[in-house]
Amino acid sequence: MDLGKIEKLYSENFDKFGIDSKSVGWNSPNTQQLRFEKLLMVVQNRSESFSLNELGCGYGELFKYATLNGYNINLFNGYDISEKMLLAAKDYLNDSKAVFFKEASIITKADYTITSGIFNVKFDEQKDRWETYIKDTLKNMFENSNKGMSFNLLTKYVDFEAKDLYYADPLYYFDFCKKELSRYVNLIHDYNLYEWTIIVKK
Ligand SMILES: C[S@@+](CC[C@H](N)C(=O)[O-])C[C@H]1O[C@@H](n2cnc3c(N)ncnc32)[C@H](O)[C@@H]1O
């Protein structure tokens, strides 16, 4: 999958907004954090010490949020395709437990793997090609997770669709995760965003 346009979008956003939820496509820190709250439900027990991969870490807000909210991360592998985001994250987090990779898929094993928002903007990519990319990425995330993974997508239950965004059927992805990945799948679609989160445990 050519992610060039996506890399450009977020790098330019960073030039415009800097360390701000708007840089990573969210209109407020509150909605960014609500997403993190749901995605971190994959962690069995808040007091456990765990390693975490994040695919599409942006400037690193998930690590910051998790640490401030009592999660005990012993190693954070942050991945992004935007060099600007990675440099910003390194500087913003300034923590020896956080290391970074300029890669479009996961190459490190960790207890959990999380991704937030990377599947939303598809530009003019064909729907079936985009869906194959999503499913390949979910498999890659799951294979590299010892305990589980979580991801979110815009929901198809909307009354307006922007042309360059991808709106996903949660039932399709629930079924995919159940059949292809694990027996332990949780679909969360009861929070106040036009999105849903899926958690897959091993
Ligand atoms: C919507 S932003 C979210 C950032 C962060 N997860 C947050 O919520 O604050 C998506 C980020 O993922 C990056 N990205 C998109 N697709 C990616 C991929 N396949 N691999 C790594 N990074 C990706 C983008 O460059 C961007 O920084």
Image (spheres, rainbow, N blue to C red):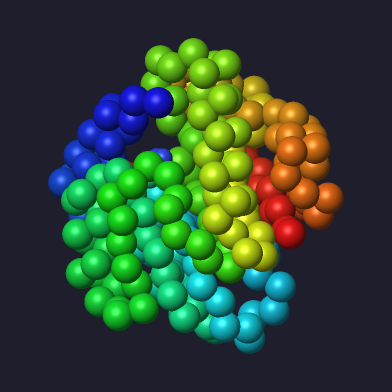
Give the residue at x 62% y 56%.
149
Q: Nearer the viewer, residue 5 or 154?
A: 5
Residue 197 vertical placement versus 6 (above, below): below
* Numbered disc total: 0
Task: Answer with left or right where residue 35 lies relative to residue 80.
Answer: right
Residue at the outermost left position = 15
Residue 39 vertical placement versus 92 (above, below): above
Q: Nearer the viewer, residue 61 or 174?
A: 174
Q: Quadrant of the N terminus?
A: top left
Q: Quadrant of the C terminus?
A: bottom right
Image location (x, y in percent) of residue 146: 63, 64
Give the residue at x 73% y 58%.
201
Residue at the outermost right position = 183
Image location (x, y in percent) of residue 12: 20, 39
Give the residue at x 57% y 25%.
131
The quarter of the picture where residue 19 lies is bottom left
Task: Answer with left or right where residue 14 lies relative to residue 128.
Answer: left
Task: Answer with left or right where residue 152 lies relative to residue 61.
Answer: right
Q: Is residue 199 visible?
A: yes
Q: Nearer the viewer, residue 59 or 72?
A: 72
Image location (x, y in percent) of residue 189: 73, 46
Residue 129 vertical placement versus 147 (above, below): above
Image location (x, y in percent) of residue 46: 64, 80
Q: Is residue 192 visible?
A: no
Give the residue at x 60% y 33%.
135
